[in-house]
Image: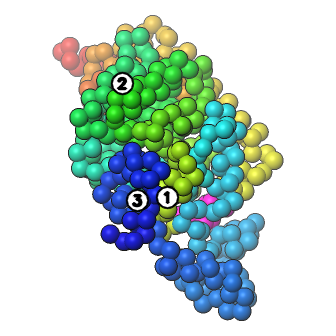
Amino acid sequence: MNPLAKQLNEILERENPYIYQMLSKLGKEIYFPKVGILSQSAEAKTKATKYNATIGTALEKGQPMHLKVIQDTLSTYAPKDIYEYAPPAGKPELRTAWRSKMLEENPTLQGKLFGNPLVTNALTHGLSIVADLFVGPGDSVIIPDKNWENYELTFGIRRGGEIVNYPLYNNAGKFNSAALGEAILGQKDQGKAIVILNFPNNPTGYTPGAEEGRQIVAAILAGAEAGINVVVVADDAYFGLFFEESLHESLFGALSGLHPRVLPIKIDGATKEEYVWGFRVGFITYAAQSDALLAALEQKTMGIIRATISSGPHPSQTFVLHALKAPEFKEQKLEKYNIMKGRANQVKQLLGHPQFLEAWDYYPFNSGYFMCLKLKTVEAETLRLHLLNQYGVGTIALGDTDLRVAFSCIEESDLQELFELIYQGVRDLEQVTAK
C-alpha cells in the first residue's frame, strides 16, 4: 500500500475507527499524490517567478493561449477563469461560496463540523465517488422502492453492492421510517449499511415533513447504536424546490454530529438548483468529528477525482460562481421557483377531478420535478407506448402500475391537456381490453 494511503488510513482509524471500517478496499488504497505533477505545479505557481515550466497548458503573453473564435463567445470572462485547469477539489472561490449558501439555506448546520464542499462533475459523479470510497461487493445499499434507476448502476453494477429496498410510503401516505429502520437493523450481522436519502424524491416528488424527518434520523441513530456503521448519503439533487409544508432543509444538518458510527455525506449541485443541467457542476461535502478526519476524507476524495476525471470543467465553475455572486441571483431564482410551484399546484388541482380518479391514484408529492400516477386498469409500459405512438406524449413507465410525469418541463397552460391525453390513453386501452 502506498505510504500516503497508509498515512490517511492511520488518521481515519485514530480519529474514528468506524469511518475507517466503512471504507471499501479501493477507499483504503486511494490517496492524493503529494509529490506528483499537480502538487509540484501548485508549488511552482507560487514560487516560480521567472519561468514556470511545470504543467501541460500553453501560455501566450502571460495569459492562457486560446482561440479568438471561442473567446469571442465568452468575452465576459478573463481567459484565466475559463481555460486553465481547475484544481482537483474545484475552484476555491466557488467552494467557499457554495459552503456559505449551504449555511444560509440549512440553519441546522450552524455550529456543526463539516468540510468545505469539493466540486464534482455534477451529482452522478458525487454518488460515484461515494460508491468508490465506501461500497464493496456485498455491502448493503438501502434505497426505497421508488428510486432513481442510476443507483442500481452506480452502487450495484459498478461496485457490487447489494440493493436493499423498503417501501417509500407507509399506509398513511407518509415516509416509511419504520421500514427504513428495519432495513438498517437488518444489516446488524454485516455491521455496515449505506443509506441513500433522496428528497425531493425522484420519481415521486415527495419530501417528508418535520416529524418524518425526526423519525428518519431516529431510525439511523438506532442502527448506529446497534453497532452498525452507517454511511448516509443525502442526495439533494432537487434541493430548494419545496412547494408545500415539508422539510425545507437537507437532513445532512440533522445527521451531522449524530453518532460516531454515522458518516453524513451531502451530494448537491447547481444542476437543478440553478437550472444549469449541462454545466455539470456538483458538490460532495462530509460531516465528521474532527478537522483531521475531514482533511483525510478530502484527500481520498481528491484521489478518486484525480484518478477518474483529474478535475472538473473550469468554465462552468466560473459561470456558477458568477451567478452566485450576482445581485440579481436570488430574485431570478425566486421567479423560476414560482413558475415550478405554479405547475405543481396546477397538477394537484387537476388530479382531483373525479374522472381522473377512475383511472388512477397518485402518490403523495409536494416538491421537485415529478409526480407518479398509480394506474388502476392498464399496465404502465403499455400506456407509455400508446401515449407515445398515438398522441405524441412522452412519460416514464416504472414497474407495472407507476407512470412518472415530469411537470417541470410542461407549461402550466398545457398541463390540463397533458393529463386529459393520458386519461384518453387509458380509456383507449380499456376499450381494447373489453373487446
Which residue: 36% across, 52% down?
23
Front one among 40 and 245 = 40
**Disc ID at residue 116:** none
Kind of residue sitting beneath label 3: Asn
What is the secondary structure assignment of the residue under circle 3?
helix
Furthest toward the bottom, the residue is: 50
Kind of residue sitting beneath label 1: Ala
User: Given contact means CB atoms under 8 Å apart, are the residues at marks 1 and 2 in contact?
Assistant: no
Q: CA distance from mark 3 to mark 2?
A: 30 Å
Q: Is residue 419 magenta?
A: no
Residue on which disc 2 sits: 181
What is the secondary structure assignment of the residue under circle 1?
helix
| In-image side of 73 versus 381 (left or right) | right
Pick whichever of labels 1 and 3 is earlier in the sequence: 3
Q: Position of residue 1 (x, y in %)?
A: 32, 69
Front one among 207 and 361 = 207
For label 3, count other residues whose C-alpha is less than 10 Å away and answer few (under 14), some (14-19) or many (20+). many
Instruction: Inspect this view and state whether residue 94 appears.
Output: yes
Which residue: 68% across, 54% down?
96
- Does 240 appear above or below 8? above
**Disc ID at residue 9:** 3
Furthest toward the top, the residue is: 354
Pick whichever of labels 1 and 2 is earlier in the sequence: 2
Q: CA distance from mark 1 to mark 3?
A: 8 Å
Which is more foreground, mark 1 or mark 2? 1
Furthest toward the right, the residue is: 327
- Write down the region rendered in magenta: 312-319
Q: Position of residue 233 (x, y in %)?
A: 45, 41
Which residue: 61% across, 28% down?
248
Front one among 117 and 2 = 2
